[in-house]
Amino acid sequence: MRGREARGAASKKTNLPEKSKLSNQDSQENSSKTVTRSSRKTSNANVLVTEDHGNGGEASNTVTEPGSSTSLSSRFKKAEKTKLSHGQNPTNSVVSTTELGQTKKRAKVSIAYEKETKRDKWEPSNWIQILHNIREMRKSADAPVDTMGCDKCMEDEGTPEILRYQTLLSLMLSSQTKDVVTHAAMGRLRKHGCTIENILKTDDKVLEDLIHPVGFKKTKVQYIKRTSAILLDKYNGDIPDTVEKLCELPGVGPKMAHLCMNCAWGVVTGIGVDTHVHRISNRLGWVPHPTKNPEETRKALEDWLPSDLWSEVNHLLVGFGQQICRPVGPHCTTCLNVEICPYALSPNTKSPRKRSPTKSPSKK
């Protein structure tokens, strides 16, 4: 018995170091696990994740390396700046949240600017088709303005100064006067001697008789006399070469000035708007809002009509107004624009009435 107890005690002594070794190993493993977990916590504390939704709506992460003084995000920012400076398109690059917000703001400003530009650039609908139809209706060029307009009232031969002076006088006489009457009056003035010196020598009563039946003949004679004296003293017998200086002359307005610059000097400075152009522009809807006078119509037309059409539009619309789009009783049924003209389509517009046959007197 004593021998068995001695052998059991010896075995216990031999097993004690092994258990202690196992316990030491377990404690070391546990401590290492603890160190590893703590290091992971420390490393996780140094990780910065930034979500980016700039690549087609998918999130991407930007990671900061532990122990590194420069983050990956800052490196990407530097790379982006380098690409932008070299003109590259950084479509697949990582963009930070701050940079993404700036990009959105810039896009909104650009969109707002484009909308502002489109809103300012107004133009009437179907105006190109309407213009083409008017040209088609005017291709025969047989309206009074085609043969008796202000550009047809000067002499066939003469010095440039005299021809420009006669052009100015025909425009001054044409105000509220038909082309037929103006052309006939200028013919009598040319026969009398239509030069600055001779007009200044002519008695006012004689001039009134020469231009009769031009409307407001007494007032126009005074304008012609005063203008002729200014041209002789200030412009050495010639006419001014700018719209501003022409408008300073007695009896000369913007319409006359722009037409005079075109006909006398060959320079297009604006649209000459008379009663025909004013009326037709409002009927066709070529003004954004109804205008009250020719000057308002001129400004509205010049805001949208291409400048290369300014010289043509006066001559085109005047003849169109003399023959078809007349002030009273317009020939809408024969107009090529009857299907697209706002005036013809308006319910308030009365169609031209057909003349009823004359009734024979009843017999009593």
Image: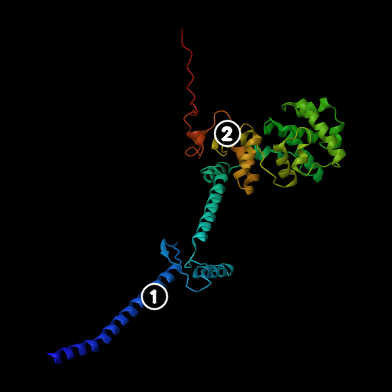
Judging depth in this view, the residue of 242 and 112 nearest the camera is 112
Can the viewer see residue 82? yes
Q: Quadrant of the N terminus?
A: bottom left
Say which residue label 1 marks: 35
Mark identifier at residue 330: none
Report the colour scheme: rainbow
149 horizontally vs 25: left or right: right
> Residue 185 location, x and y as percent?
74, 32
Q: Nearer the viewer, residue 220 or 210?
A: 220
Q: Is residue 67 left or right of residue 256?
A: left
Residue 217 percent coordinates (x, y): 75, 26
Q: Secondary structure at mark 1?
A: helix
- Check the image and name the residue furthest to the front: 2
Q: Residue at x 24, y 88 (%)?
A: 13
For marks 2 and 1 on the same chain, the one whose residue lies earlier in the sequence: 1
* Residue situated furthest left in the rendering: 1
Say which of 18 and 57 sits in front: 18
- What residue lies at 30% left-to-right and 84% top-to-bottom? 21
Label 2 SS? loop
The answer to which image quadrant residue 235 occupies is top right
| Residue 152 sits above or below residue 93 on the image | above
**Closer to the eye: label 2 or 1:** 1
Give coordinates of residue 338: x percent, y percent: 49, 37
The residue lying toward the viewer, choosing from 229 and 140, is 229
Q: Which residue is mark 2?
A: 290
